[in-house]
Image (tube, rainbow, N blue to C red):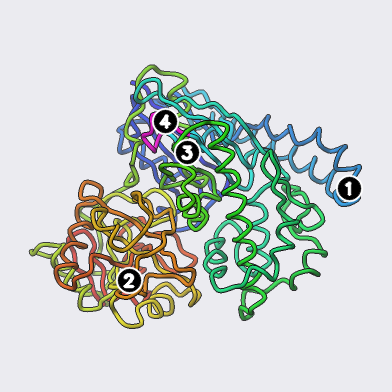
Amino acid sequence: MSAVLGLCSYTHDSAAALIVDGRLFGFVEEERLSQVKHTEAYPERAVAWLLEEANLRPKDIDAVAYNFSANQYLRAVPRTPALLLSAETRHRALPRALGFTTVALRTMARRQVLAGKFPRARVRPLVHHRAHQTYAFAASGFDESAVLVVDSLGEIQTTTIAHGRQPKPGHPALRTLHAVDDPASLGYVYGAVTMHLGWRRGDEEGTVMALAALGDPARFSPLFARAIRLTPDGFVVAPELFPPRTLQRGAARVTPRFIAETCPPRRPDEPVEQVHRDLAAALQERTEAALLHLARKARKVTGSSRLCVGGGVAANCVGIGRIVDEGIFDEVFVPPAPGDSGTAIGAAAAVHTSLSPQPLTGIEGACYLGPSWRSPAVSWASRPNLRVKRLDTDRAEFLADRLAEGQIVGLFQGPVEAGPRALGNRSILASPLSEGVVDRLNATVKFREPFRPFAPVVPEERAAEYFTLGQPAPFMSMASQVTAKTRTRIPAIVHANGTARVQTVRPDQNPLLHSVLNTFAQRTGVPVLINTSLNVKGKPICGTPDMALDCLTNSGLDALLLEDWWVTK
């Protein structure tokens, strides 16, 4: 038996994955168990769950795949003289060299800590983008494709284009053909503007993307054309607007010049004004232009007609939707966990492939990979304010009826989803036909900004009636234009930019959710529901029954379907 443990640890979105004899046994983000959103801690609970489920002990792990390579950080140091020669970057040159060296040493030390936890295992560091590439490609099931990874930073890489192929099923092989290094980083710029607009970097970029639909990009388009200049090799970032990063906490990410040409930093408690909307719109417009430019380059250098996209910027569903709409590729794939948490899977997969002739299985199309509680061990006596009954009727029919009546219901079933989107196992469902449902969800259930849209979910076989995407979207990773039928019948799921981040579902992917949709269609004539994550703003998606019950208690949810228990307040 061979066992490879993949880790994303000591950085945001801590997670663990386990591959046993070539099969992806499981994966879970630590936040789903610890209740600490985007936790950087070692994924202790995630690892313990994986080992227990696989009936393994730490000494049974053969290899630990870590999602960063310490030596790669040191490649930033030789750039220091060039930064010292420029008046715009001179003040950042030495702090930057020190910061990257410090992180390299820290990563080396973390490798030793991990080695101490698994006595027989060799800790194998992976170049961060190789972990992203391997996961995105292996999860797609493609036998060959271009692979584009765009994030804030992986050691010193921020953007890579690779060619993926599978000479034999289950044997992914990747070759990096092009790379863009820091300080040119789309993720860095998007995060910097997110902070400037008063939201949390690394968490609320999606809020800025939603806000962009309400702004006019023309006001700041010339500025962002200077800030992110497209080149034959990719793009460069203007240091007079976004200074080179130092990897030191508290360092400014925008310059006084950027502030003078845009607006003062907005505090989180200040109102959102038109200048903030316009700034978000211009940022999003330029990000989309850069993504399209990179996608075209990926098509040119690989010659492939299919594309896999990974990295944190792949969570920009509007940008991914633009790539699909432009028809650059015949098919575009984004894995369910495109950000750093998914590199735990990619690192484990890459290490397994390098060590074993066994084919890699269990990754293609997989998203329900975490813990499940088929018979939840809940102390109902400790929750006297809840009313509980066990359903003895068809769950899909019962839930569809409640949704058709206008109730907003949490759904907790089966294994926890991978990635940032709730895909029907840890979801909040609502009817898009209910008057004022978006306002109610934002104000009393999710406790978030009123301009935030909600994603629709639809059976894959009926998606073309309501959405123009033209391909499956099982992981809610692409914004689609909508049909006239959608605009007329269910405008609640259409954002201000005319798109919707759709999830398509087949019966083999999620039988209960697919059945609920079809039953809801029988009741209402519409096979579409609103699907948002089972959490409130600032909290992670509920991974455990107690987390789900707390969400019910502390929000405006009408009810929770917890496996086959119907829970109300």
The residue type indicated by label 4 comes to Pro
User: Which callout, 3 or 4, points to the residue nearer the camera?
Assistant: 3
As helix, strand or loop, the secondary structure at mark 1 comes to helix
Q: Give the foreground label among 2 and 1.
A: 1
Label 3, on which residue?
Answer: 344
Residue at left offset 49%, top offset 39%: 343
- Image: 474 above or below 204: above
Residue 552's label in the rendered image is 2
Instruction: Name which of mark 3 and mark 4 comes first in the sequence.
Output: 4
Disc 3 is placed on an element classified as: helix
Q: Mark 4 points at which residue?
A: 58
- Real-space Cα distance between discs 3 and 2? 31 Å
Residue 35 badge: none
Answer whether residue 141 is magenta in the image: yes
- The span shown in magenta is 138-145
C-alpha span from label 1 to label 3:
36 Å
The picture quadrant where one finds residue 34 is: bottom left
Local secondary structure at mark 2: helix
What whole-number distance in Å separates the C-alpha atoms at marks 4 and 1? 47 Å
Q: Residue 89 in the image: x percent, y percent?
A: 85, 49
Q: Check if residue 326 falls in the magenta segment.
A: no
Of discs 4 and 2, which sits in the foreground?
2
Labels 4 and 2: the sequence-earlier one: 4
| Disc 2 residue type (three-letter) | Leu
The residue drawn where x is 25% and y is 48% is 509
- Of mark 1 and mark 3, the one earlier in the sequence is 1
Pointer 2 local density, CA inside 10 Å: few below 14, some 14–19, many at least 20: many
